[in-house]
Amino acid sequence: MIPACCEGKYETTIKSNRAFTLVEMLVVISVIGILAALLLPALSAAKATAKRMTCLNNLKQINYAVRMYYDDSNDASPPGNGPRGSPYVGYKGRVRDYLGLKGRSSPQDKIFACPADLFHYYYPSNQGCTLTNAPLHDDKECDYSSYLYNGMNLPAVFSVPRLGIAGLNLASIKEPAKTVLVAEEPAFYPYSWHEPKLNEGLMFNDAKDMVSFVDGHVSYIKIYWFETKWFAGVL
């Protein structure tokens, strides 16, 4: 019983000298490490998905702008001018106005920049292929764009024949849902910015890339590549 003189002043304190043991601390650290290991892949996957969605939206708008150019040009494809004198690069200068871009091309044209574009392959004159650890959309030679027009069929572009739609009217294309209009640069080789396999060399089968088609839809698809036919000049 508390004496009357001490009512309201009596205080009880409980002190404990117990602390975490080394084993308990190691267990906590281990749990945190396991949770981080489980969380990081999920965050990485979410970040990769966000990049693909940005790239998909870019291509949708660029695809629409290219088709508007066709409509305003009596269904004529972009002419072969611009950097390297080829429509697979020079098309950008023909569709900039449709996308609200003013002035000269630059790396600041973000709609032409795939966020997954962190490296590209460069072909110096009379030299082999070189991996460049820089975005393609920072490259003046590609008119600061991660995306190419499907115009590699012109003889002026490559010494061996390739498939493409340069010089064709869109109305003449029989299967627009299966015909590429504009795509990420790696889709034409192929390799991948989104799921790279640099240890497998310049090109590999089933590389996954973002591709837009003549009918206007955009898909994240696997690209078939057959090495023997490629180097024989068939593709």
Image: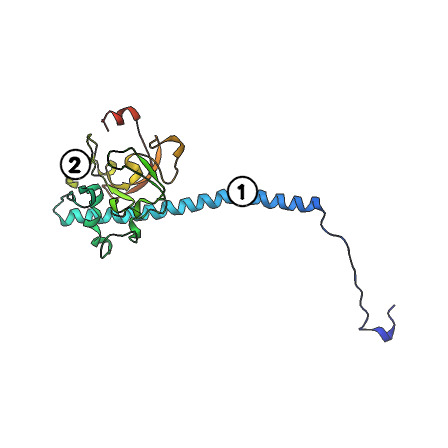
- Asked if residue 212 shows in the view, the reply is no
Quarter occupied by residue 5: bottom right
Residue at (20% x, 45% y) in the render = 83
Quarter occupied by residue 172: top left
Rendered view: 40 above or below 97? above
Q: Quadrant of the N terminus?
A: bottom right
Front residue (pair 175, 25): 25
Image coordinates of residue 157 in percent, x first then y, are: 19, 36
Image coordinates of residue 93 in percent, x first then y, are: 20, 49
> Callout 2, which amino acid?
Ala
> Callout 1, which amino acid?
Leu
- Asked if residue 90 shows in the view, the reply is yes
Q: Which residue is mark 2?
A: 156
Distance from disc 1 to disc 2, alpha carbons, whole Å, reads 51 Å
Q: How is the image coloured?
A: rainbow
Q: Earlier in the sequence, mark 1 or mark 2?
A: 1
Disc assigned to residue 173:
none
Residue at (15% x, 40% y) in the render = 171
For residue 15, side relative to residue 112 (left or right): right
Q: Residues within 10 Å of mark 2 (few under 14, many from 20)?
A: few
Q: Quadrant of the C terminus?
A: top left
Q: Which residue is mark 1?
A: 38
Image coordinates of residue 18 in percent, x first then y, are: 76, 52
Furthest residue to the front?
A: 126
Q: Is disc 2 placed on a helix, strand or loop?
A: loop
Residue at (31% x, 29% y) in the render = 225
